[in-house]
Amino acid sequence: MAGPLPVSGAQRALYLVELLHPGTPMYNITVAVRLEGPLDVPRLRSAVARVVARHDALRTTFTPGTAPPFEPAQRIGDPDAELPVVDLDADGTEDVDAAAFRVAQAWADEPFDLERGPLLRTRLLRLGPGRHLLVVTMHQLVSDGPSLQVFFDELAEGYAGGPERAAPALQFADYAAWQRARPVDAEQLGWWRDRLAGVPTVLRLPADRPRPAVAGPHGGSHRHRLRAAVMRPALRLAQDLRVTPFVLVLTAYATFLSRLAGTRDVLVGVPVSARDRVELESVIGFFATTLPVLVEAGRDRNFADLCRSVQSELLDVLTHRDVTMEQLAEELAPRRDPGHAPLVQAFFSLEQEPIVSPHLPGLRATAFDLPPTGAKVDLDMMVFRAAGAGDDFDLTLTYRTDLFEAATIARMAEQFELLLVAAVSDPTAPIRSLPGPVEDVPATSRPAAATVAPRLDLPMSACTGMEQNLIQIWREVLSRDDIGLDDNFFDLGGTSFALATVHTLIGARTGAKTSLVSLLEFPTIAALARHLADGPRTGPAPVEPADQARAARLRDRRNRLQQRRSARGAGE
């Protein structure tokens, strides 16, 4: 087993989310393949083992950092692949395909143990004579979209008995080490700073319920079929405008979000591949990152003009893709609000081909993806060409269930299709004339923030026992003694991974049980001590106005800290 190796920037950010919300399937990637015909199970099991042996990423696990700078590391283990076979247990009242889908979804939703691994699961469900369902689930820390096709291509080679190929000369760990050793590109970061100056970094979508203080990981998915009658004219218009179908549908999505949120400027996160070397094209690993695309959906602009503008914007983003989303969030949205994803709260992706195209010799193979049940952001639109359906596309909206009802999302999908059809049919009409979200989409209002007097720092002798314990832990982790009861952990130089160490020490030294995400919700000694004294909360996180009152207090404290730092800097 290889020793600790550095993680990439994208892995680092994703690992932190896993620490905050452990035991969820939020970043599981699952593809199920229906296999019809005489399947040789031992040969398939051997083919899976060949792929695992060839790609280090599929044998990788992750360990937390226990010493400054508290960075996680990845380890590469020995080849160990399994392909258990399970007989479908369905009663006579349930359709076989529906029962198989139910089992596959349950497998897809099983969380991974990042430290113990493995982060790849392959299982075979036997539906009947000559009928099987192969379910492949990978954690996104070790995989991305192109990796899935690499996996199934090599699986076909192994199943066909082709000659074994040598392992790739470059593995993902090599890329991660190179990427983390590379300094931040100051010129590219400057471009992002100038481009997004003044752009709102919070997209306030109307929701069915008040936003909780801490965004939860629980999500739902709604699938909507965009028929060929809708997509063929859209694909033709993309050709006429000389933009990609990705850009055209992204523009429609951003326009829809703009109308929904009542704002002109919208930031949408889009996947960007880092496979910029030929040697990496056939390597399995997490080479994708997400970057924001700014769409300026002014009401007087027409759809065709906006599409061209978004195409240009996307090309600029790709030119400046060496800056990671994590670096952008620290630079452009440094205030941590656990109620929102940093910088971008809406994602978009589109593929003109099905997610994978499996082809095992002697078998009829049909793939379909299983949508995630965890939500990474408020709203995530994924569009894939439907397998074997010509120009039909499947649209999946994944959403936070603590914000939206399923019926609201279903209505959004229908309204989006109406906007897309109208925009394509008359691309020179002003955006304000396009059909927008109807008024019955519910919206929650935000009460005004309460004014709360700042809590004064107390001498150590006046602190409670819990406060004294927390102060001592902070001193050790932050390596500083000037810690006040109302100081914000991050203003004192703390990082998210250092906070994970604080969480571990709190449990070990005080016996208090709380979630890591609560340390984001209560980032001061005083607030955290009160939270721990009250005991772990089992219900949902409190919503505004309590959250706004706390935010107002923390903002006031942060401003005073910054003023003190500025004063010290001026006197030096």
Image (cartoon, rainbow, N blue to C red):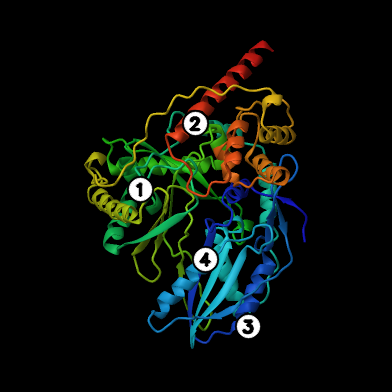
The residue positioned 33% from the left and 38% from the top of the image is 297
Give me the C-alpha separation between circle 2 and circle 1.
31 Å
Q: Mark 1 belongs to which amino acid?
A: Tyr
Q: Are marks 2 and 3 in contact (CB under 8 Å)?
A: no
Amino acid type at circle 2 is Ala
Looking at the rendered structure, which numbered label has been put on residue 108? Answer: 4
Q: Nearer the viewer, mark 1 or mark 4?
A: 4
- Nearest-to-viewer mark from 2 and 4: 2
Image quadrant assignment for residue 481: top right
The residue at 63%/19% (across/down) is 565
Eyeballing the image, is 98 above or below 216?
below
Q: Is residue 52 above or below residue 351?
A: below
Which element type, helix, strand or loop, lies under badge 4?
A: helix
- Up the image or down, 23 lies above or below 559; here it is below
Q: Which residue is mark 3?
A: 42
The residue indicated by pointer 1 is 253
> Is residue 389 left or right of 461 when viewed as pictured?
left
Q: Which mark is residue 551?
A: 2
- The x and y percentages for residue 147 are 57, 61
Can residue 431 be seen? yes
Lower sequence index among marks 2 and 1: 1
Q: Relative to the observer, which residue lies in front, 178 or 199?
A: 199
Q: Nearer the viewer, mark 2 or mark 3?
A: 2
Which type of secondary structure does the marked residue at label 3 adopt? helix
Between marks 2 and 1 in the image, the one whose residue lies nearer the viewer: 2
